[in-house]
Amino acid sequence: MADLPQSSRLRDSDRLTRIHLSAFDRFKFLIAFTLVWFILVWAAMADNPILSFSDAAYNVSVQRKWIFVLAILEVIRQFHFLISELASGYHKTWGKYFLFIDRLVHKISDWNRYRISRAVKALIWIALFAVVLGAIYHEPPVKALFLAPKALWQALPIIAQLAFAVVFILIQFVAMFWFLSRGGIDTYFPDDIKTRFTDVWGQDHVLNRLRENLMFLERPQEIEQHGGYVPGGVLLWGPPGTGKTLMAESMAGETGKPFVFVDPGAFNNMFFGVGVLKVKGLFRKLRKLALRYGGVVVFFDEADSLGNRGLVRPGQLSSESNVFGTSCHGGNYLSNEAAALITREKFVVGSAAGGGGGMGTLQALLTELSGLKKPRGFFNRIVRRVLGMRPKEPPKYRILVVMATNLPEALDEALLRPGRIDRIYRVGYPSKLGRIRTYQGYLDKVSHTLSEEEIDKLATITPYATGASIKDTINEALIIAIRDERKYITWPDVVRAKQLKELGPPEDVEYIERERHAVAIHEACHAVMAHVVRKHMSIDLATIEKGSDYLGMVASIPPDDQFTHWRSEYESDILVSLASLAGERMFFGGDNSSGVSGDLESATTIASFMEGHWGMGSTISSHASNKRFEIGTPGGKGKPGEDPAKEMRRALADRIEENLSNLLKRAEELLAEHRFSVLSVAHALETHKTLAGEDVAAVIETRKGSVIDGSVYANGNVSEQLEAYHTAALSAHRDHAKPEVALPVLTS
């Protein structure tokens, strides 16, 4: 038969020695007797001013011998306790012969013994107080006890004055901290919340998880009846504008519970302790609302302002901070020791992410989230305990904590442990179907002429649109329509609104002819290269209209939601970036502008990651690991004994340069092959300034587009006209003059 598990706590009968008393419990009665003796001596000296302290002490000691008798008995009692605490034999013998006393005492329940002990202690203190009053009033102790209220009433004016002065000073501090602890917290009652899950579009996978969490407020008893506990909270993390706040509000709307919104800056305070007061006051309010309405939803926006350490378990939250990469959690294939080693080498504990988590605020919040609840109410906590009555158990507070953040890596680990904020959901960019549903939802609120095909197309050309950006785009399109004295939105309105929001308003400037042509050639090279080699992306628009930080641009979008990327795709991205340099050198006789700097930076960055991180170069080892351990990289040609870091940088730079040079040659060959397409797109850009993606494709493929008829470029003499115009523009470029040939006007 297996041995039964032993209890971790010994019974009193099984202890070898008595439990040690604290210092206060050992000396409290001796201290009380000493204070009574000093008060009696003071009273005697007050009655006889010529009496010295020694004489007064002698008289009190002779007249009040019972004080010393009680003190001696207390000393003997404590000496007995001390020996029992130190000597097991003494404790065993005493317990053996006086066990019947312990049996008689333990026939009374623990709580009744507690009540009796409290009553006895109260009687002792009352008796000592009566003795002191008797000495002061020169009356018997019992009579003096009844004379105390009269004396208190006579001294009430003086006491009231002192109390007023103290209270007045305290009120100043209390009022100041009270006002400082207000603000940043808004309460919305069930009748004020109109948001439901049906008002949240494009995040169905997250809403399904949140629906499951509603039982924490609606049916918590079912979890607790089966031995479980109700989870503490939910964390919604993801990019801004994806609907995190709306989801939290909809949870309150679905359950019919109050919604408490906590502002991100609510816990940022000048004085120490104010943040703690805010946390205490917040949860006091939450408990009241939870009792009144059967539950409450509290939402902490920008919860990263609460964190102060910034270390996350690898792979749990943020893809940017994941040591194992974004698409494949390599740590899953490692032993625990190996994964811990890599994580230790990768992550460094950072500084505070926000000011709100300091000065005890975060600690107070963690305490409140731990679920430790004291008995509710002053009478229940204080009065009942003073009367020797057991306080009532605190009620079940149904508080659902929802937090949102864009920076989950900044949250404290203690905040995310099980039992606190233990439901973590990523609210990412909506899928294409989600974007379609979101566009339909906002378009249903206004008058429009968009077809289902156009809405589908709109969702396709806005791959990273959030709920907030979609709402803003539709609103901007409505403003454009009203400005044009229309009450309905059309497709061109939406396109204009999209361009305005993504690119900003174009600057009201005009290029001189030769510079306009140079910018058009630059962007045409990007567009043609993107059309030819980049199949995983579609051209959204091409423009030569000057913006705040660009002379022109070619924007591309992924036609489908894609979560993995391949070497061929990255190489095509580099080709598109290098097309500007290759094209300018080809069309301008080896010359190129400073406008290629941004393109070269993009190409170099991608090539660096391909070579050193993604295994898409000539070597396999990770540059990140090599750099961390300072072991150099394969292919280094440094001198013996040279700094490994210098060797590593040189080797990596050589491999990156070689890869970029090969891709530049390929870009030159492709552009030479599609020279006429570049001149055609450049002409279309000079003519129309901005082209939609389908119009760019129409020009390259010499077919009719949605706005531009690209078939005009199929005429035989168009090539000669465009070459003649480019030759004139090139000559003007060299001489800093105006082209002698005007921009050709093509007709079908």
Image: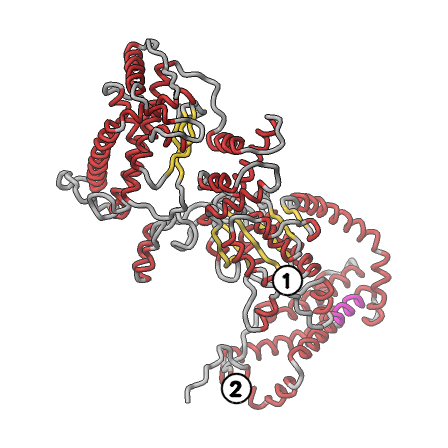
**Quadrant holding the C terminus:** top left
Q: Sequence order check: which comes first, mark 2 or mark 1?
A: 2
Q: Is residue 3 above or below residue 499?
A: below
Type of amino acid under label 1: Tyr
Give whichever of 333, 104 is nearer the camera.
333
Label 1: which secondary element: loop
Q: Residues within 10 Å of mark 2 (few under 14, many from 20)?
A: some
Mark 2 or 1: in front is: 1
Q: Quadrant of the N terminus?
A: bottom left
Q: Is residue 503 left or right of residue 287?
A: left
Residue at 86%, 56% in the rendered image? 154
Q: Quadrant of residue 657?
A: top left
Judging by the rendered image, the residue that carries numbered circle 2 is 92
Image location of residue 115, percent across then percent down: 70, 76
Q: Kindly state the secondary structure of the residue where label 2 is placed.
A: helix
Q: Label 1: which residue?
A: 397
Amino acid type, mark 2: Lys
Give the extent of the magenta segment: 126-135
Question: Is 537 in front, or is 451?
Answer: 451
Specify the quadrant of the image occupied by residue 105: bottom right
Relative side of 242 to 279, left or right = left
Q: Residue at x 46, y 49 (%)?
A: 408
Identify the colour scheme used.
secondary structure
Q: Is residue 463 above or below residue 81?
A: above
